[in-house]
Image (cartoon, helix red, strand yellow):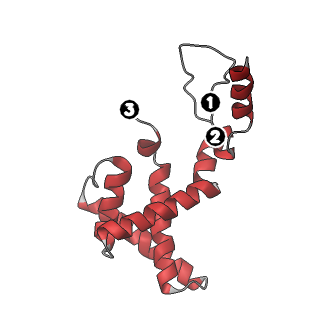
Amino acid sequence: MVTAVHGGALYLNRPRIMRMTEIPKPQQFTNIGQHSLVPTQSLVLMNDEFVAEQAEHFARRVVSQAGADREAQVAWAMRIALGRGPPDESRITQAVVFLESQRQRMIDEGSSPDAATDKALADFCRVLINLSEFVYVD
């Protein structure tokens, strides 16, 4: 009985990011999981503060392991997030263009060049976290 009470409390008090996903209730028993995707799940992954913090940690890890070279950062971030590198050179080029446009936008908004560089990489890491390939394992 105690386990059921605690299990229910854990279900009701889970973090906001977990409340947006369709996690089965502990009181429901089934051998088949539900497969669904609701818009709130995608929105939470894109906008949640926890996900933003994790993207910043991810970006710092990429810099520490790949150095300051943008192409190396892109390739390494993809390897970490997706278990593979970019499929071709054009994807690296697209990602570097994204990083530079984000960096410039942040500088235009008043960020220092160093802060803008860091934030642009964190934004790219957040994009990787939001890819279906990252979220769903085949």
State which tag comes first along the sequence, 1 or 2. 2
Per the image, label 1 sits on a secondary structure element best described as loop
Identify which residue, 8 or 138, lies in the foreground: 8
Quadrant position of residue 31: top right
Per the image, label 2 sits on a secondary structure element best described as helix
Please name the residue that numbered disc 2 is placed on: 18
Give the residue at x 50% y 58%.
Answer: 126
Closer to viewer: mark 3 or mark 1: 1
Please name the residue that numbered disc 1 is placed on: 23
Please name the residue that numbered disc 3 is placed on: 138
Mark 3–mark 1 distance (CA, rounded to whole Å): 19 Å
Left or right: residue 14 compared with residue 80: right
The answer to whether mark 2 and mark 3 are in CB contact below 8 A is no
State which tag comes first along the sequence, 3 or 1. 1
Give the residue at x 69% y 45%.
Answer: 16
Amino acid type shown at disc 3 = Asp
Quadrant position of residue 53: bottom right
Amino acid type shown at disc 1 = Ile
Left or right: residue 130 compared with residue 86: right
Where does residue 137 sit, x and y in percent of width and height?
Answer: 41, 35
Q: Looking at the rendering, in which quadrant would you find the C terminus?
A: top left
